[in-house]
């Protein structure tokens, strides 16, 4: 019997299998970049110190450069430019304050990053496998409702994992006493809301790119585009996490 050539095999055919994308070069490039950058970024946030400040400064300046470069191409460059300065400054500042000035800030900053990574990953996988109706075709044609569901599931699982490990990372004498039934419901709500906020941050940057008429904000990260393409969800989730934790520490 003649062996089936790879290009004739349904597993390798984009037209016959949604799983074929997971064998493609673009995904391999995205995964390689993520596997290199994510552990380094996580270590920097966890460790803090001069390296953290240096990385935050470089990331902020690069993000601002990408935004302003696109603003100059738009029809309202002054408004777009000021919007970028305000938005990026608030998001970066809340993340820095969260990591530096909150108790166990390194853990909290890493938790925010893991939540966003988990949400983005499951959104990407679910969208590619299940497809279906578009979420916001006018803003981001590739996003689907199945991907949105994956984003919520990924964020929820990550937040639950953070909640389960926090008392151990914080050094509680009796970690079991940390868990209460009312808190679990709040944690579930926070997880779902983190997924929604992350998607909103993604769509906000997509709206900006659509307005300017570009696909990516830059070409800094192979397979991902610019730094804003990579941290679009993280920025808004950071601001949300900062606000939520302020309420938890100072209000509740």
Image (tube, rainbow, N blue to C red):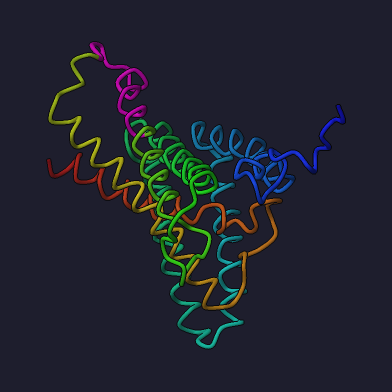
Give the x, y percent position of residue 67: 56, 69
Which residue is depicted at the point 36% across and 47% down?
Answer: 195
Residue placed most toward the observer, 123 or 237: 123
Residue placed most toward the observer, 53 or 83: 83
Which residue is depicted at the point 20% across and 30% down?
Answer: 184
Give the x, y percent position of residue 41: 57, 39
Q: Which residues are magenta?
A: 159-175
Which residue is depicted at the point 48% across and 78% down?
Answer: 80
Quadrant of the frame with the C terminus: top left
Q: Main secondary structure of the magenta part?
A: helix
Quadrant of the frame with the N terminus: top right
Give the x, y percent position of residue 238: 39, 49
Give the x, y percent position of residue 209: 55, 71
Residue 153 visible, this orientation: yes
Figure quadrant of residue 83:
bottom left
Check if residue 14 falls in the magenta segment. no
């Amino acid at each position: 019997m003649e062996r089936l050539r790879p290009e004739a095999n349904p597993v390798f055919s984009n037209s016959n299998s949604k799983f074929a994308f997971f064998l493609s070069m673009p995904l391999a490039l995205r995964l390689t970049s993520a596997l290199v950058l994510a552990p380094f970024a996580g270590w920097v946030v966890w460790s803090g110190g001069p390296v953290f400040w240096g990385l935050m400064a470089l990331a902020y300046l690069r993000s601002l450069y990408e935004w302003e470069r696109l603003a100059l191409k738009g029809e309202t460059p002054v408004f777009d430019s000021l919007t970028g300065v305000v938005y990026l400054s608030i998001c970066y500042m809340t993340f820095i304050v969260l990591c530096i000035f909150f108790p166990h800030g390194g853990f909290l900053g890493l938790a925010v990053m893991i939540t966003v990574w988990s949400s983005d990953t499951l959104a990407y996988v679910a969208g590619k496998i299940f497809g279906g109706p578009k979420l916001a075709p006018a803003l981001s044609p590739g996003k689907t409702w199945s991907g949105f569901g994956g984003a919520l599931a990924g964020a929820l699982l990550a937040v639950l994992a953070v909640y389960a490990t926090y008392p151990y990372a914080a050094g509680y004498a009796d970690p079991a006493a940390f868990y209460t039934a009312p808190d679990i419901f709040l944690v579930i709500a926070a997880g779902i809301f983190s997924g929604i906020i992350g998607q909103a941050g993604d769509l906000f940057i997509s709206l900006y790119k659509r307005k300017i008429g570009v696909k990516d904000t830059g070409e800094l990260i192979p397979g991902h585009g610019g730094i804003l393409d990579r941290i679009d969800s993280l920025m808004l989730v950071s601001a949300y996490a900062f606000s939520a934790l302020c309420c938890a520490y100072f209000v509740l």
